[in-house]
Image (spheres, rainbow, N blue to C red):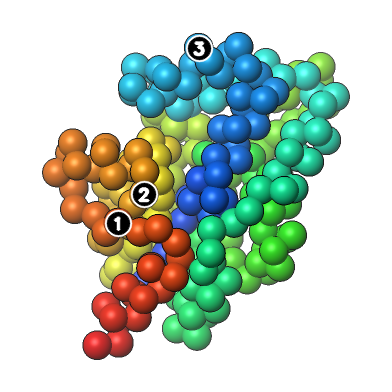
Amino acid sequence: MQTIKQQSKVVFCDFDGTITAVETFAGMLKEFAPEMAKEIMPQLYAKTLTLRVGVRQMLESIPAKIYPEIMAYSDNKPIRPGLPELIDYLATKQIPFVVVSGGLKDMVERVLKREGLQEKVSSIYAVEIDTSGAYLSVKSPFEADTELVAKVLVMEKYPATEKIAIGDSITDLNMAGKADVVFARDRLQEYLRAENKPYIPWEDFFDILENLKQRWEN
């Protein structure tokens, strides 16, 4: 596995419900695989079924011919305020902003490109899809353990003295466990409280921007 050059700080950010202001990937699964989603998602949140198994089952139940509709589903989903400003600030500090998603890479790229941000992020790691068969087929270079995208494996590619994680749900729990600083929203806060892992609550990326400025400049 290729390792990125040593950085003093790196920011790792989830996509679904974190960059997007609504659950775009989860919402898509409820829209295009409703029966599977109704059965599987509660098990994922309860941690009785792994993401690696559950997300794959849902995705691979979807006919490949409707993949263009799946991509179009994200077109009207807003991003959370302050993201461009945060990314621009990190660029002035030469701090990589790495998007790590348990969702679809094509969807992540589509939304970031729409917002003019795809070229500004350092890297994007997410689930890749093969549409050559009758149903979607998952191709995930970072599949491991309980995750379809093992975010900790991505983090290990980036040697740094300070690793910052931004997330909102169960898919970010392992990443949060390995980060030096965690910004958490929604369900992720509940999981971290249960594990006595400290975190910083946030509503939008302006909150994170102000916190990092105070942390690094004062």
**Counting other residues with Cα less than 10 Å from the Cα at mark 1, is it few (<14), some (14-19), or many (20 or more)?**
some
Q: Is residue 57 found left or right of 64 in the rendered image?
A: left
Circles 1 and 2: CB atoms closer than 8 Å:
yes
Image spot of residue 76 (x, y percent): 72, 48
Type of amino acid under label 1: Pro
Type of amino acid under label 3: Glu
Q: Which residue is mark 1?
A: 201
Distance Cα–Cα, label 1 vs label 2: 6 Å
Q: Residue at x 44, y 70 (%)?
A: 206
Distance Cα–Cα, label 1 vs label 3: 30 Å
Camera sees residue 203: yes
Please tell me which of labels 1 and 2 falls first in the chain: 2
Q: Quadrant of residue 73?
A: top right
Q: Which mark is residue 39?
A: 3
Asked if residue 43 is positioned above or below residue 212 in the image, the reply reads above
Asked if residue 32 is positioned above or below residue 197 in the image, the reply reads above
Please tell me which of labels 1 and 3 falls first in the chain: 3
Q: Residue at x 56, y 32 (%)?
A: 26
